[in-house]
Amino acid sequence: MLAADQLLGNEWLEIAARLLLAAAIGGVCGWEREKVGRAAGLRTHMMVAIGSAGFTMLGIELLGGGSGGAANSQYDPTRVLAGIVTGIGFLGAGTIIQTGGKVTGLTTAAGLWTVAAAGAASGAGAYRLAMVLAAFTVVVLAVLKVVEHRWFATKRDSDSG
């Protein structure tokens, strides 16, 4: 049975902080996608970020970087990262649609991929990297969208996705 200090100890708080940051990053980035009515919006982006953080944390645990892993084991957390990249690429591909000569969903797919990277960074404890990735993603999704509408709206549909 867990004692109170084990239940609320620093390791548990660190786990919660990593997942909370991942959820916040996914939420902030998914909010813009939700506002423009994309299928992969707030909850999807949050789940991708949380899942990426969770898989990254699990890879670290299995390597022995946390309390549950065996030191010098056969596990390699970089393989977990490669799996995240591949899996999110597959998920993102599902958001890309071509109809009537127009391709939509590219921005959403790229957003999911970037949110996965930020979630993985959060899961690894690289908080600054996670927050900078999130900030850059929000700038690209929200701020540059205004620039894109103003300068490129006549050449193509300015929100590709």
Image (spheres, rainbow, N blue to C red):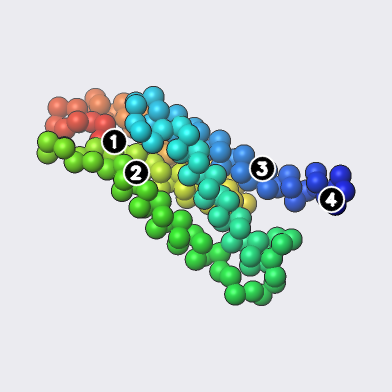
Q: Secondary structure at mark 2?
A: helix
N-term mark: 1 or 2:
2
Instruction: Identify which residue is drawn at 55% across, 55% down.
Output: 55
Q: Nearer the viewer, residue 17 or 3?
A: 3
- Depth check: 99 or 137 in front? 99
User: In the image, what residue type sits under mark 3?
Assistant: Ala
Kindly identify the amino acid type of the residue bearing the numbered disc 1: Gly
- Tell me which label, 4 or 3, sits earlier in the chain: 4
Alpha carbon distance from label 4 to label 3? 20 Å
Q: Is residue 123 left or right of residue 89?
A: right
User: Height in image: 10 above or below 107?
Assistant: below
Residue in the image at 58% along x and 70% along y = 75
- What's the mark number on residue 6? none
Asked if marks 1 and 3 touch (Cβ < 8 Å), the reply is: no
Decide: few, some or many residues near mark 2? Use Cα within 10 Å; few <14, some 14-19, many ≥20.
many
Is disc 1 in contact with disc 4, using a CB cutoff of under 8 Å?
no
Q: Which residue is mark 1?
A: 161
Sequence-wise, the earlier of marks 3 and 2 is: 3
Secondary element under disc 4, as helix, strand or loop, is: loop
Residue matched to label 3: 17
Horizontally, residue 40 falls left or right of residue 5, namely left
Which residue shows up at 39% across the image and 58% down it? 86
Instruction: Identify the amino acid type marked 2.
Output: Ala
Query: Which tag is nearer the camera, tag 1 or tag 4?
Result: 4
Q: Residue at x 61, y 58 (%)?
A: 58
Structural distance between the alpha carbons of marks 1 and 3: 31 Å
As drawn, the label of residue 2 is 4
Relative to 128, say whether 83 is above or below.
below
Asked whether, in this view, residue 99 is left or right of residue 133, the answer is left
